[in-house]
Image (cartoon, rainbow, N blue to C red):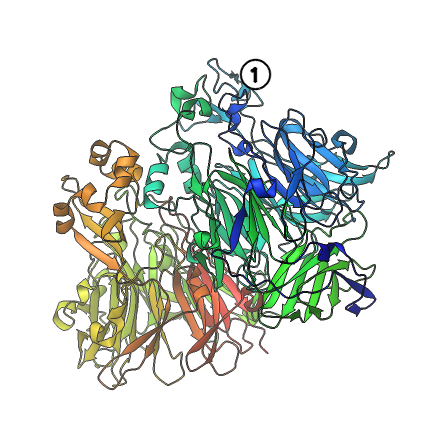
Amino acid sequence: MNSFSRIVISLVLPIASVGGTLITPVGGAEPPVIFAGETLFNEIRPSESGLDFVNPLLPDDPRNYLYPFGYACGGVNIGDLDGDGRPDIFCVGGPVANGLYLQVGGEDEVRFERVPDGLVDGADAWGTGASLVDIDGDGDLDIHVCNYDAPNHLFINRSTPGKPAFTEEAAQHGLDLRDASIISSFADVDNDGDLDAYIGCNRYVPPKGLPLEAPGRYDAETQSMVMFPKYERYFRAWRKADGNFEADSYGRDDHFYLNTGPGPDGRPRFVDVTAEAGIDGAGHALAATWIDHDRDGLVDLHIANDFEDPDRFYRNLGPGPDGIVRFEDVIADVLPYTTWSSMGADVADLDADGRLDLMVADMSATTHFKSKVNMGEMGGRQREILESGWPRQAMRNMVYLDTGLGSYREAAFMSGLSSSDWTWAVKLADFDHDGRPDVLLTNGMSRNYTDSDRPFSGRQRYGRTQWDHFRNDPPLLERNMAFRNAGDLRFEDVGARWGLDKYGMSYAAAYGDIDLDGDLDVIVANLNEPVSIYRNDTDGHWLKVRLRGRNGNTHGAGAIVAVETASHGTLIRHASPWRGWASTDDSDLHFGLGDDVEVASIQVTWPGNRVQRLGPVAADQTIEIAEPEEADSPAPAEPTMFMAAAEGVGPGFVHDEKPYDDYRMQPLLPGKLSAFGPCMAWHDVDGDGRSDVFVGGAWDQSGELWLGGEDGRFTRVDVPAFRSDKASEDSAAIWFDADGDGDRDLLVTSGSSEFFERDRRLRNRLYLNRGVVDGTIAFEKAPSGSLGGLAFNSHAVDASDFDGDGDLDLFIGSRSVPGRYPDTPASHLLRNDSSNGEIRFVDVTAELAPGLGEVGLVTGASWVDADGDGKEDLVVACEWGPISIWRNEEGRLNDVTKASGLGSVRGWWYGVVPGDVDGDGDLDLVGLNVGLNTKYGEANSTSPAVLYFGDMDRSGRPNLIEAKCKSDSMLPVRGRSCSSGAMPFIRKDFESFRDFASADLTGIYGESNLSKAQRFEADGFESGIWINVSEPGRPSFEFRPFPRIVQIAPCYDAAIADLDGDGFTDIVLAQNHDHREPETGLWRGGVGQLLRGTGNGGLEPVHPSRSGIVLRGDGTGVEAVDVDGDGDLDLVATMNGDAVRTFLNPGS
């Protein structure tokens, strides 16, 4: 092990000088430590370390009502507090005094000594979070402590090496807020060189629970409840659906303090400008994380709020005319959805793209049993928020990936980080020196307050606190978790292997190089046990960067340091140590380098986007970089491949999805079946050489025809025939010559679960093109009998002359039977028997394509000549099945799916699009699937997703049962509450949530019922390319999944074309789906994806910051078409419930 003395001795020698900038090494470089122990981390016992601080659980403490909340256990903080060059530790006490531990050990020894109480003990205040921060700009670390219902403390550091000295000066600095303070965080928000402060508040807890008397009165004038003064700090009244009011606890307002510089006494003065700055809205704050998400040089702020309170993402708008910074909450524009009970948060580059990502923790259970016990009754205000709050909230961790264009993708499920139990701290750092940030999560709670068999509700809450109700229950002991970043958004659970899987009640955590050997050690605050200290014994090279900012921001908070490496590309770190949860990390920025013995260059982006570039630096040392007086500007951003079109360019259609309760008839439906539009179909309708488009409408919305014009300006044409059918929902559309007159007519299929089977609004519609009449394009609706008079839930359509008689025939695929999902609906092969101007399509499915009518839940279809015999075959995509292929054998369609290889993957296919991806002259198939970023994970042949449909309760009505495979049994996906709502016998047979959680599928529903039910399986969820390797007469395909990042969201359409003019086929994918059942939440992790062809079928994902494509929302379609007439292919995308989006290709 390397000695701390190496760090203490500062050799002021330049190792690189660029533009007059000096890098100073702190000590000399030494060889890396080689790890040879059993675990990566080794815990040092309190008897050896001297770190014996305990936050006790005192059941009879007068403030025991705080234990059910984040106040239960205070934060831990790492920093050099006495100026001797070694990290010290500060622990915050709740019912006990704070503890300051100075490092006093010798070489190769980690040992601390507690300073006597009186300096920073906090008197009798109940402390929670703390920050080590240089408040007064003198270069050392002061201590800010958040206290519950007592003035916050600020201990100004007057220490010298070995002689700690602090004075409490919160009031003198304006930081003595008395509230339900829980966390603090600091940043230079106005770029004036000093640090401003954000204080997050949680809630005031009523010491005696809900009052036995009414806490307020009804005010007839305002028609609201007004709390009596003695209760207003604890309760607010909520109006229930029935019009009555309910009093409940609420989250407090946070506070933002602007540092106005030295006052008359020379001390920096902080002024509360919360309202003026635009910080508004109460919440249960648990984390405040700074990140400049839009790269404008002004640091922005993410607030994690517990319970159902929405999180906030405050964009920094810069100072107003009065010098006060203004913030705007842009969370709905930045994040696709948020956590429900947001806990800790941290930032790091998790996907190695050179941008800072954000992880926010929740309380999602890691086992089936725990998830079913803790997921209680979902009703009332919670249900309302799940269904209609915006942005939507989901009960799990989130991993937000920066697109570089002002918004984020989300990848928690596919990264394996979605569930980690009752998580507090999130720590993202490279613990194993492989260049990638890993994840440490702390877990546990004083009691299991979410135990659904122990509800604390109704009259139980009057005169009793939550602690009173649960005090005799056992503590909720959980294991801390550590995940190694294996790259490509794969994280491996290594808690046990690394020695970090402590079983207990762990809250705060902090990291830093405590023993000064170059790797990151960890401390964890435990409730009712001593603080844990873990020494890291990893190998590999490293570099630590210590920033020295100008003016009052002495540690360079807000700066971003990027180092260029030979083996790991660009590694970035953000200088903001107040993150995770209620704690402070050591402020040195640590880089694990693996086998690299140097970094090629270093770039520091100081607050305000002031850039400093430095030359090569040797590994295995700590260097200090001083902020220069003069600095460069950031390099200009590279132009993107596509640009969002200006207003007025592209079709102006706005889709108007109507609310509809799909769950009324089928309460356990996995997702809505009424919201798949809009569709679109392109064709030069008016013959002017420009592409025109029909965009389908929702129910009670007419589809629209938009004609292309000069410079990409489109004009809507009023078509009375379309308007007359607005009662239907347009599900698919195709232009084809139905009547043989040489122009293309329009077929629009009708579909949706909003209409019962055989409802006339489900009849498909054929609009005959009558050319220009009175100066405008005219269409006439063909008689309904022209298409056989069929009325069914259509979803896919394509045309081909499959029988070789010279006219175009149709396949129309059905999505589902309304009200009976997943019963197999009837799809139809329609032969064109039109003659002498009479339009007539005849259903020949049973005659010419046996089995095609029952192909499944059709989501897409295309005619392709798969085997090169000159006859078009039919490929059909289905949910809960394979993509099937029906070979055209002299006008008869035969199912050759299994022999073709397409039957090897039963997926939730949402479409199939043909295109020559590998450039060999035949048509490959783009298979659009659900992806890997859902709660269903990665299905395979041994662990498929399963769905049963049958009468489980002997009611005569079939029920839906989702199941998952676990070892040798099957378990229900849905919980007791929602399942019993659909099948009341469950509540009777399984009286407790524990009973239900302990039962497998057979134990709940019975082997007999399950065996009689229909069973559906899916064993592959990846989207990808089916490469055509057919021989004449023998269709054959091989599957190649898309790159992993593509699996971040379900795909619903693909545009296949050479978009960049390099001669290789590219693909653009429409992604996301917003209409799953509320507890599942949105499938909105993607933003659309461009895949650049590299030849021979190779596809390279293009980052959104390079492609310019960000499609936030429910993408249903995408088309490559020259919108503006410049010869380059642009992109037009349809979005459910939103406007059509157009992206222009500027070309080369």
Q: Residue at x 74, y 62 (%)?
A: 611
Q: Nearer the viewer, residue 98 or 350?
A: 98
The residue labelled by disc 1 is 228
From the viewer's perspective, tell me whether residue 703 is left or right of residue 712. Answer: left
Quarter of the image containing the C terminus?
bottom right
Image height check: is 894 above or below 114? below
Element marked by disc 1: loop
Q: How far from the left and from the top, in percent, is residue 945?
A: 28, 56
Quarter of the image containing the N terminus?
bottom right
Q: Name which quarter of the figure residue 547 lies in.
A: bottom right
Q: How far from the left and from the top, in percent, is residue 998?
A: 26, 40
Instruction: For label 1, count other residues whose C-alpha is less than 10 Å away and answer few (under 14), some (14-19) or many (20+).
Output: few
Q: Residue at x 46, y 16 (%)?
A: 463
Q: Nearer the viewer, residue 401 or 74?
A: 74
Evaluate whether residue 361 shows in this view.
no
From the viewer's perspective, tell me whether residue 437 is left or right of residue 792. Answer: right
Q: How far from the left and from the top, in percent, is residue 739?
A: 27, 73
